[in-house]
Amino acid sequence: MDSGGRFSESLSGGDAAGRSRPARLAGAVLGRLTGRRARSFSVRRARSGQHLHQRLPRGVGVVGVSLSLAAAALAGFVASGRYDAFVAEQGRPLDIAARIAGFGVERVTISGISRMYEREVLAAAGIDWRTSVPFLDVADVREKLLRVPLIAQASVRKIYPNEIAITQVEREPAALWQKNGELSVIAADGTVIDAMRDDRYASLPLVVGEDANTKLPEYLALVAAAGPLAERIKAGTYVSGRRWTIKLDGVDVRLPEIDPAAALARLVRFEREAGLLEKDIIAVDLRMRDRVVVRLTEEAAAARAEAQKAKKKGTAS
């Protein structure tokens, strides 16, 4: 600055140090305000002729190539199906990491189990040794459990570090239903809730035929009306969507469409008075109110035929 208080500068716009006029002005003002000598910093732009690899940090190219190769290898691993096989055998990578960290599922507590087996609940929930507590989706597990017809309600909780708690409410089986040779377990309203896979349901009442499941309350009322014969009833067949035939100790009892309970009361009386069901018969027809029709076994029928022939010969002589 000269004696007149003016800043001296070159016409070229820079001083000897190579600073531009705006930079020098800013430095002078800042110096006056702070009482210190201001320092100016400049950011140099890369020369237009400088190549990209000269401006990037060293090693970036190697890292990029490595990542590309790793991504390609991972894509090939997944596409080949080997990843799915690995997950099926060892579990998901996140679950593996959690198990290594000590959060694998070591205990599952199941409450409310009645008809099902523990292994069936675990299989339905998709929980096994490959599962980890942190990455278990409890909402998904609950949804899987509710797909089981026998399970009416279910809840799932995580108990860190190693436990899962399942609480379920099962539908109550009421009977077995046979249709087209297949056995199903049904609830009181006729809803199919399970398949007949073993003998755990063997003691349940059995109904047979089209729509027999929806008529279960009617059949159970007939069994109750059978009184002392109820324990001997093995099954009920719903015939033509109209009436019942009851199998009782190997004897088919054909009931009428109207007032079948009254027909059963007649059968109870006949059995008490004459021991009807102890005879060599295979069927009793109670569809007519004024009579009872019985069908003999083949042996009994043959013996009766021979007896009738002998009787006729004796009469003729």
Image (tube, rainbow, N blue to C red):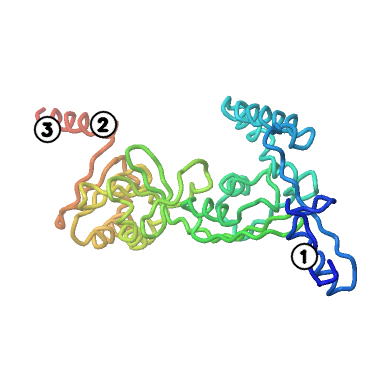
Q: Is mark 1 on a helix, strand or loop?
A: helix
Q: Residue at x 19, y 51 (%)?
A: 292
Asked where in the image residue 90 lies, by quadrant, the reply is top right
- Judging by the rendered image, the residue that carries numbered circle 2 is 303
Three-letter amino acid code at disc 2? Ala
Give the spatial CA distance, label 2 vs label 3: 18 Å
In the image, is 256 to the left or to the right of 271?
Answer: left
x and y percentages locating residue 201 in the rendered image: 49, 48
Mark 3 vs 1: CB contact within 8 A: no
- Judging by the rendered image, the residue that carries numbered circle 1 is 26
- The front one of 170 and 123 is 123
x and y percentages locating residue 290 in the rendered image: 14, 57
Disc number at residue 80? none
Tell which circle, 2 or 3, labels the residue nearer the N-terminal end.
2
- The front one of 73 and 219 is 73
- Judging by the rendered image, the residue that carries numbered circle 3 is 315
In the image, is 170 to the left or to the right of 41?
Answer: left
